Amino acid sequence: MLRRGLLIYVLLFPLAGVLVVCFIPAREKTLLKVVSLTAALSASVTSIVLWWGYRSTWFYRVVTRFNLVPIINVNFPLGIEDLTFCILVLTTLIVPVIILIGWDAIEDKKKILIFFL
């Protein structure tokens, strides 16, 4: 199923954006904005795809399990329930809007963009 592992990508896209923004010089303001907006939009699109595949259950809506070390059965489960999922989708939709609104207004762009991501 396509939506099975998407929850981890909603978390990894902003983290990857922060790591890339950290290594971009502060004088490259346009590149900083484009990279942070791309990371935020990637997380937004991924969360919308997750929301599209909504299946209401009693427990967790989206659960992702990763088998980190199969020999000794070390797993990484990641789950999110209904209310938290709604907050996650709302947050991932608002962050690109905030970045676009502050496109020209923010002076110290690197610190603010890292904070938003």
Image (cartoon, rainbow, N blue to C red):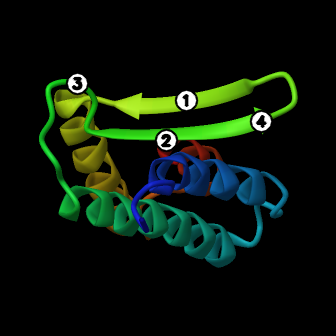
Whether residue 68 can be seen here:
yes
Q: Residue at x 60, y 46 (%)?
A: 114
Between the C-alphas of marks 1 and 2, the distance is 6 Å
Mark 3: which amino acid?
Answer: Phe
Mark 1 or 4 closer to N-term?
A: 4
Mark 4: which amino acid?
Answer: Leu
Find disc 2 in the rendering and name its residue: 64
For the residues labelled 1 and 2, say whether their Cβ atoms are less than 8 Å apart. Answer: yes
**Mark number, residue 68:** 4
Left or right: where 62 falls relative to 41: left
Mark 1 or 3 closer to N-term?
A: 3
The answer to whether residue 58 is above or below residue 42 is above
Q: Residues within 10 Å of mark 3 (few under 14, many from 20)?
A: few
Element carrying mark 2:
strand
Left or right: where 59 falls relative to 15: left
Mark 4 or 3 closer to N-term?
A: 3
Mark 2: which amino acid?
Answer: Thr
Find disc 1 in the rendering and name its residue: 77
Question: In the rendering, at what x and y percent does residue 38 appear?
Answer: 53, 72
Element carrying mark 1:
strand
Q: Quadrant of residue 34?
A: bottom right
Q: Quadrant of the N terminus?
A: bottom left
Mark 2 or 3 closer to N-term?
A: 3
Question: In the rendering, at what x and y percent does residue 103 appear?
Answer: 43, 69
Between the C-alphas of marks 4 and 2, the distance is 12 Å
Q: Nearer the viewer, residue 39 or 85?
A: 85
